Amino acid sequence: MFSITSCSKDDDEQVSPPVTYMEENPLAKYYENTGFTTVTNFVNSGDYEFGLVFSPSVKGKINSITVKIPDSNPNLRITIWDYTTKTVLRSEIVNVSASNTLITKNISELSLEKDKKYMITMNSNDWYKKSKSNNSNATYPVAAGNIQFWEYRWLSGTAQTFPTNISSDYNAGDLSFNFQQVN
């Protein structure tokens, strides 16, 4: 007696729904891991282009940027840079309508490559200076979820110029982004 059965390839393969990862904002973890808990407010204290160098440990995207400063500013310029080529990948103007208020601006998706270095900066004369209580240096790189922070950079002036000065004993901000891992 012979039995003939037919197997369909479709029956053997199960299609998994795509995984959607939660967004993460790495700034709070960065501050926790650096020990930058002492805060000083600076208002109308000279113009600077400043921010953090970072790289994702996974492929992902930035969906929005976040900023909080101790004064209002209807035209705060935020820039995301390719660290290696020192070129602007994205420039956004954020209306910081209220001081001491976290502002989130949704942006068109910006894809980020795993382990590639980027920098996010703002140009402002208002910021929170965060440091350790003893003013000692943080140890970089600093892991914050799927983001590694490599250094804090700054440059005096209002020009959209890649910052060249590096400081390890403080961060001026609060400037960050919402990152989402992708497959």
Image: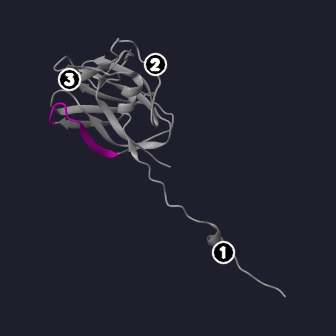
Which disc number belongs to residue 126? Answer: 3
The tag earlier along the polypeptide, 3 or 1, is 1
Query: Does the segment drawn in magenta span residue 105?
Result: yes
Query: What residue would you read off at disc 1?
Result: 8
Q: Which residue is drawn at 20% across and 23% down?
A: 126
Q: Residues within 10 Å of mark 1 (few under 14, many from 20)?
A: few
The tag earlier along the polypeptide, 2 or 3, is 3
Q: Specify the segment rendered in magenta.
A: 97-108
The amino acid pointed to by label 3 is Asp
Q: How crowded is mark 3: few (under 14 residues within 10 Å), some or many (20 or more)?
A: many
Q: Residue at x 30, y 31 (%)?
A: 175
| Relative image position of residue 170 (x, y in whole percent) | 34, 18
Eye-nearest disc, 2 or 3: 2
Numbered-mark total: 3
| Relative image position of residue 41 (x, y in whole percent) | 21, 20
| Relative image position of residue 73 (x, y in whole percent) | 16, 31
Q: Relative to 5, say whether 123 is above or below.
A: above
Q: Nearer the viewer, residue 112 or 146?
A: 146
Q: Are marks 3 and 1 in contact (CB under 8 Å)?
A: no
The amino acid pointed to by label 1 is Ser
Relative placement, left or right, of 169 versus 159 is right
On the question of residue 81 being in view, the answer is no
| Relative image position of residue 97 (x, y in whole percent) | 15, 36
Which disc number belongs to residue 80? Answer: none
* Colouring scheme, one of rainbow, by chain, secondary structure, one colour: one colour
Q: Which quadrant, please, contains the N terminus?
A: bottom right
Query: What residue would you read off at disc 2?
Result: 139
Query: Does the segment drawn in magenta span residue 146?
Result: no
Marks 2 and 1 sit apart, C-alpha to C-alpha, by: 57 Å
The quarter holding residue 25 reads top left
Marks 3 and 1 sit apart, C-alpha to C-alpha, by: 65 Å
Q: What element carries label 3?
A: loop
